[in-house]
Amino acid sequence: MTVGLWNTLRRRSAAKDEKAAAEAHAKAIAAGASEQEAKAAGEQAARRTRRRRRILLSGAGHG
């Protein structure tokens, strides 16, 4: 694979992490959470997204 492809994949992954964090943050704010709690919810959602991606790419989710 070329370096450009790796950069593209990395950017797409970062964008997905950011989207998950933003959605979780907005959902927490809508539910009445404080800014600090909403930020923590966003960070947790991004970690969950990265963990899910790693599991799926490793093939550990099968069997």
Image (spheres, rainbow, N blue to C red):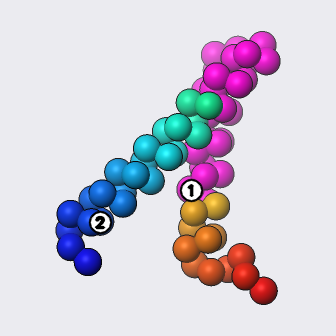
Q: Where is residue 53 in the image (x, y as percent from the top left)?
A: 57, 63
Local secondary structure at mark 2: helix
Query: Does 46 sit left or right of 24 as displayed?
Result: left
Classified by dominant secondary structure, the portion drawn in magenta counts as helix
**38 in magenta:** yes
Marks 1/2: CA distance? 16 Å
Can you see residue 37?
Answer: no
Can you see residue 21?
Answer: yes
Pointer 2: residues within 10 angstroms few (<14), some, or many (20+)? few
**Camera-nearest label, 1 or 2:** 2
Pointer 1: residues within 10 angstroms few (<14), some, or many (20+)? some
Say if mark 1 contacts mark 2, CB within 8 Å. no
- Give, as a single range, the part of the protein colored magenta: 24-51
Which residue is painted at 71% across and 25% down in the image?
27
Query: Does 8 sit left or right of 37 as displayed?
Result: left
User: Foreground residue, 34 or 26?
Assistant: 26
Q: In this view, does 48 lie above or below 40?
A: below
Query: Does 13 sit left or right of 45 as displayed?
Result: left
> Which residue, given by chain and number where applicable, does mark 1 sit on?
50
> Which residue, given by chain and number where applicable, does mark 2 sit on?
6
Q: Where is residue 63 in the image (x, y as percent from the top left)?
A: 78, 86
Q: Position of residue 44 (x, y in %)?
A: 65, 42
Q: In this view, does 4 lie above or below 2?
A: above
Q: Where is residue 43 in the image (x, y as percent from the top left)?
A: 59, 38
Which residue is painted at 27% across and 59% down in the image?
7
Amino acid type indicated by mark 2:
Trp
